Image: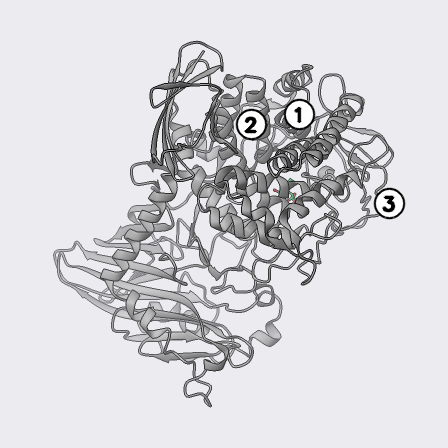
Amino acid sequence: MKFGYFDDEKLEYVITRPDTPLPWINYLGCQAYFGIISNTAGGYSFYRDARLRRITRYRYNNVPHDFGGRYIYLRDDESGEFWSPSWQPTRHDLEDYTCRHGMGYTLIGSRYKRIAAHTNYFVPMDENLEIWQLTLTNHRSERASLSVFSTVEFCLWDAQDDATNFQRNFSIGQVEIEDGVIYHKTEYRERRDHFAYFACSDKVDAFDTQREALVGPYRSWDKPRAVERGRLTNSIAHGWAPIGAHQVKAELAPGETRQIIFVLGYHENSRDQKFDPPDSQIVNKRTVKPIIAKYLDSGNVDAAFQSLHRYWKGLLGILQVDTPDVHTNRMVNIWNAYQCMATFNMSRSASFYESGIGRGLGFRDSNQDLLGFVQMVPARARERILDLAATQLPTGGAYHQYQPLTKRGNNDVGSNFNDDPHWLIVGVAAYLKETGDWSILDEPVPYDNQPGSEQSLFEHLQRSFQYTLDRLGPHGLPLIGRADWNDCLNLNCFSDTPGQSFQTTTNKDGEVAESVFIAGLFVLAGRELADIAERRGLAAEAKSYLTEVAKMEDTIRQHGWDGEWFLRAYDDFGRKVGSKECSEGKIFIETQGFCGLAGVGLDDGMAAKSLESVSQYLATPHGIILQQPAYSRYYLELGEISSYPPGYKENAGIFCHNNPWVMIAETRVGNGDRAHDYYSRINPSAREPISDLHRCEPYVYAQMIAGRDAPTHGEAKNSWLTGTAAWNYYAITQWILGIRTAYDGLQIAPVIPKNWPGFKATRIFRSVTYHLTIERAGEGNHVALEVDGVPVHGDTVSPPTDGRKEVSVKGTLT
Ligand code: GLC
Ligand code: GLC
C-alpha cells in the first residue's frame, strides 16, 4: 500500500494523506541554517549545531510521535471554526491534502470548507533564515473573513539544557517586538551575540510571545485558547516559554488569492555592536532589518526559491543515469544523491530518530559519507576532511565524534574504536580521485586540535595506517578496541551493570580480541595509501605498505577463514566469533562484504565462496541480514550486539549500511545480476508499494529493516541519517554501473545485470562532461571503449588534453 507517489519530473515525492505510518520528513537548508520538517509541518530548526544552537523547540518521543512544529492555523472568523492546513496539530479532516517534499523545500497544501491554503517552506541559499510562503485562496461564492495564525516555540539555547534545566530556563526568557517582528533574545543580555526573529509580511493585528497566553492553561497546540477565541493577546514573555505567534486578519473576496510570508531567522551581531543604543539592553537591529525586509517581499522570495531549485539541478546534474530500472534512475538521479547531502550535513546528529543532542559528527561516519557526497561540493568535502583530521590523536587514533560548532573531539565518547583511523584514508582517497586536488595532502593539520602539532595531511594518513600495525593481536589480526565498524560488537566491555555505555565501558586490557573486519579495512586502506604514496614519488613507502597488506591478507587466509566464509572476530578468550563452531552468530555479513570489496580472496575463490554463503544464509527478500543465527540471549563477552532482541539492529537486523559492501563484492567477482538484485531489495523506491510494511519514507534509506527473526520482518526504522546513503550511491554508481573515479581519469567498468541491454549516463568529472552509452553485446563484463569514436586501450578515459569540455564515450560489453 502506498501513501503517495514520486513526481520525478519535479524531483518531488508527493504524499497524499497526512497519516503516514511514521512522520515522513524532509530537510530544509544545506549550508548553515537547517530545519527538519515532517509531512504535517512538524519539526524544528537550528543553526549549524542541533544541540548548541537550536532555534525552535521540539519534544522527541512524543505522543503523537510527531508533535510541535511550524504550525499555521486558519480560523473562519464568522463561524469561529479553526483548523490546521497541514493537518497537525488540530487534525481536522482536510480535502486535497498534499505534501510535496522536494529538494530543500516542502510544500504542504490542503482545502477546508473551500478555503485552500498552500505553504512553501524553504531556506534560501546563503541565508540563515527560513521562509513560510502561505498562499490562501477563497473558493467560496461569498467573502471569507479569516484569521491566520503563525506559531513557533523558541528554544535558542542549549537543547540539552532546554530539556533538563527548567529551574533556570523558566526565568530567563526575553523578547522584543518591533514593527510586528518578534525578536527572541534570551541570554543575549549576557554571552550570546545571536538572536532569533519571526516576521510577517502583512499587517500584524495581534501577536503573542508567551506560550501560556496563546495556548491557555491545561490545553495543548491542538486547541490553543487564543486561536479558539480568535484573538491573540499581545503577551510579552518574561521567562517561562517564549514563543512567536502572529495574527493576520484576511478578508478574501470570492476567488481571491492572497499571499502571506513568514520569516523565521537567526542573526549574529558583532560583540561590540550588540545593543542599540550601545548603553541600552535593546537588540541592535540595524544589520538584520534589511534581511528581514528583503524576504518579506514576494518577488525576492520567488527569486530565492528559483535559485534554490537551480542549485539542486546543478548538483544533481553531476551524474544522471538512464537505465532500464526506474528505481535505479530515481534513486541515483534524485533521492540518493539528495540523502547524501543530508548525511554529509548532519552526520548522525539530527533526524526524527537522532535527537540532535547526543551525537556530534562521527569520525568513521563522516569519512564514509564522503563517498556519496564528494562529487557534489568538493570544497566542502575538503574542509570536512581537514576538520576530521584535526581531531586525530598523535597515536593515529581518533576521537569517535566531534561537535560541529566547536570542531573539537568529544571527550565523552573518547577514542579507541580501532577501525576509525582507516576511514580517513578511504575518505581522502575518494576526494583525490574525484578532484585530482593533490594539494590537500600538504595541508598542515594539527593533532587533537593542538596548535603547534601540525603535520601534513599525508603524515596523518601514514599514522592512521601505523595505528593498526602498532595494535596487532595474538593471531596477527588487528585488535578491535572498543568496537570496529559494528559499534555493538564490544569484545572488551563485559558489562553487567544496567545503563552502562557499551561503547565507553572497557573492562578488559584489549590485548586479545581481534577484528577480521578491521583486517579487511586495513587491506583496502593500505592499498589506497600505497597508491597515493606511489604517486607522490614515495616508492619505498608504497612498497612497504603493500608488504604489510600482503601480510595481512595472509593472516586473514590463515586465521580469518572459516571454511565457507570469513570469520568475524576473536573474543577476549581468543574464541572465534562468526564461525560454524559458534552456537549462534555463526556467519556475519561485514567480513564477507568487506573482504571481497577490498579484494581479499579474489584469486583463490574465498571471496566467491563467502558470497555464496551470504546468499544461502543471510539474504532475505527485504535485504541481507547482519548475522545468523540471531543471538537469543545476552552474551557478556559480545556486548551490545546481543542486547537487542533477535532481528533488530545489529542482532540480525538488515543493517542496510553494509548491504552495499556485498553488492560491491559481487561486482568484484563479476556477478552483476546478484549485485543489482541485492541493490533492489533495499532500494526505498522499489519498496514503495509495501509502504505499510516498510513504514519509513519511500524516498530515502533507513538504517535498518527488521530481519527474519523479528516479528516485524521488513519494517524499516531510523530513516535518513545512515551510512547506507553514501554506500548505496557508491555501490550502484561506481561499481554496478561502474562509472568510477580514478586518479588517471574516469574508469568505466560496469557489472550490470545480464538482461540489461545497456544504459546511458552523463557524468561531470573534473569540469568535463562525459556522455556515456553502454551497450551489451555479450553476457560478460568485459568493456571495450571508444572515446569520441576512437577506440582506446583499457577501461579508463583520460581527461582531454586539448581543453574539450564534452566527451562521448561508448562502451561495449562482451
Ligand atoms: C551506526 C553508527 C555507525 C556504525 C553502525 C554499526 O550507523 O553511526 O558508526 O558503524 O551503526 O554499528
Ligand atoms: C550504533 C548502533 C546503535 C548503538 C550506537 C551506540 O549507532 O547502531 O545500536 O546504540 O551505535 O553509539
Pick the residue in front: 758 or 529: 529
Task: Say which quarter of the image contains residue 448.
Answer: bottom right
The quarter of the rendering in which ligand 2 is drawn is top right
Instruction: Tell me if residue 769 can be seen.
Output: yes
Residue 581, horizontal then vertical, whole percent: 81, 22
Pick the residue in front: 190 or 681: 190
Decide: few, some or many residues near mark 3? Use Cα within 10 Å; few <14, some 14-19, many ≥20. few
Residue drawn at point x = 31 percent, y = 54 percent: 120
Give the number of the mark in front: 2 or 1: 1
What residue is shown with label 3?
Answer: 509
Task: Tell me which label, 3 or 1, sits earlier in the chain.
Answer: 3
Task: Tell me which label, 2 or 3, sits earlier in the chain.
Answer: 3
| Mark 2 element type | strand
Instruction: Tell me if residue 702 can be seen.
Output: no
What residue is shown with label 1?
Answer: 592
For the C terminus, give its image quadrant. Answer: top left
> Does 316 sit left or right of 487 as displayed?
left
> Does 84 sit left or right of 555 as displayed?
left
| Mark 1 element type | helix
| Mark 3 element type | loop
**CB of mark 3 within 8 Å of CB of mark 1?**
no
**CB of mark 2 within 8 Å of CB of mark 3?**
no
C-alpha distance separating marks 3 and 1: 28 Å
> Does 673 sit left or right of 367 as displayed?
left
- Looking at the rendered structure, which numbered label has been put on residue 457? none
Residue 752, horizontal then vertical, whole percent: 47, 19
Pick the residue in front: 808 or 331: 808
Amino acid at the residue labelled 3? Asp
What residue is shown with label 2?
Answer: 623
C-alpha distance separating marks 2 and 3: 37 Å
> Does 593 sit left or right of 694 as displayed?
right
C-alpha distance separating marks 2 and 1: 15 Å
